[in-house]
Image (cartoon, grey):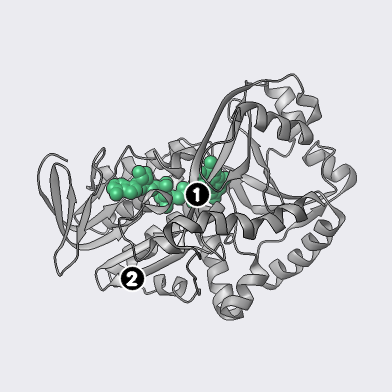
Amino acid sequence: MAEDVRADVCIIGGGLTGVSAALELAEKGYKVALVEAQDIGWGASGRNGGQIVPGLATDIRVLEKLVGTETAKILWDFSLGAIESIHSRVQKHQIDCDLRSGYLHAAIKKRQVEDLLSWQTALDRFGHPPTKLLRGAALRGALDSPRYLAALSDPAGGHLHPLNYTLGLAQAAQEAGAQLFVRSPVRQIKPGTEIVVETPKGAIRSGFLLVCGNAYLGQLLPSISPYVMPVGTYIAATEPLGEDRARALIPSLAAVADLNFVLDYFRLSADYRLLFGGRVSYSTVPPPQLGSAMLRRMHKVFPQLIGVQAEYAWGGNVAITRNRAPHLGRLRDNLFFAQGFSGHGVALTGWAGKLMAELIAKQSTDFDVFTRIPHRKFPGGRWLRTPALLLATTAYRLLDLV
Ligand SMILES: Cc1cc2nc3c(=O)[nH]c(=O)nc-3n(C[C@H](O)[C@H](O)[C@H](O)COP(=O)(O)OP(=O)(O)OC[C@H]3O[C@@H](n4cnc5c(N)ncnc54)[C@H](O)[C@@H]3O)c2cc1C
């Protein structure tokens, strides 16, 4: 940004939430100005595992207890709509992002197999597309790892190249008329009938503001920051394995995640690397020797890969909420925010963008269904919430170990 700009809607954040909202609004004819502190897709959206996971990060049965069956069902349908909208956007805008369907939720322990069965019943009750429990030879035919006892095969999930998808949406938004300003950090928001958003070299005046900074927003809006905790999470990419060797690991070519609290998640890339994600850092400081640390976890899953190197390893921040459900809301009639997608943002962010656009266009108030989810602040304030979260999660990590 090098000058002042006027727009109907200003959007802070050039991740999947922001660019989806920009695209939807520009397609509806709004004058949109999006401001991004770094580059489009620089945040979690360009760094993530690319796994398209159905549902919210909150377990479907927990969600039902939180908001009741009727609302939980609507939210579940939103998550399926979010996945459908990825497919339709990729097709409509011809986004080259290696989109593929197929997802395996993998169980390491006996109690997790029982959990998968109970979960399958809940999914059927919610009208989810039919899932299949794989064991024995059927499991090995889909995923050749000695670590898992069973896996629930879910046709709704899948995977894609997240940065290419984000950049593709951004390009489509630009082509529809949205203005995207990169390397323009927002320093201050001045609310009012006309909202003023200030960056070092220019300001945007607009009738509406959408705040989509997620784990990278910091203290820009102090009233929403205590509801999310930025947590570091990490991925390693092997050297290219060659098609035959790669396909032998995951013959189904599905994205895979286990059921542990600190989970492993992985998939093959289009150039046949294994992309292996896992580990968390509540301080957001990456673990030392990240590549080797990730390889150790990968070898537990695929001992066949001992000797294979990690060519790349990286991390990023994911914003978690206390109940892991996304935190969407209105601060004023013309100021909305969406954050806290936890590990389910690839799909849900796109839906959040669409719902914010529909709210502004007065086409639907579906956005407000998300505001029925009760959210609580992380205890401990700005400085103590990390130690508090560490204490609270230690018990879950111990459960993973046993
Ligand atoms: C390593 C990793 C792996 C993950 N794996 C998966 C996965 O496999 N599947 C899945 O569903 N989810 C996954 N996630 C989560 C998912 O990536 C996020 O939920 C999602 O990308 C959030 O999108 P967003 O647009 O809300 O936020 P982001 O993509 O983080 O974008 C926010 C943007 O706002 C900008 N910003 C912040 N403050 C300002 C400001 N003051 N001024 C201007 N700009 C600002 C930031 O620079 C940033 O670019 C993963 C996350 C990480 C980090």
Left or right for 281, reference 94: right
Q: Amino acid at mark 1?
A: Val
Name the element at disc 1: strand
Left or right for 119, reference 358: right
- Quickly name the residue at label 2: 330
Left or right for 11, reference 149: left
Q: Residue 394 or 66: which is nearer the viewer? A: 394
Q: Is mark 1 within 8 Å of ligand 1?
A: yes
Left or right for 282, reference 370: right
Q: Quarter-wise, where is residue 327 in the image?
A: bottom left
Residue 290 marker: none
Which residue: 66% across, 26% down?
292
The total number of labels drawn is 2
User: Which one is earlier in the sequence, the residue at label 1 or at label 2?
Assistant: 1
Which residue: 24% across, 69% down?
334
Which residue: 46% across, 35% down?
96
- Quickly name the residue at label 1: 318
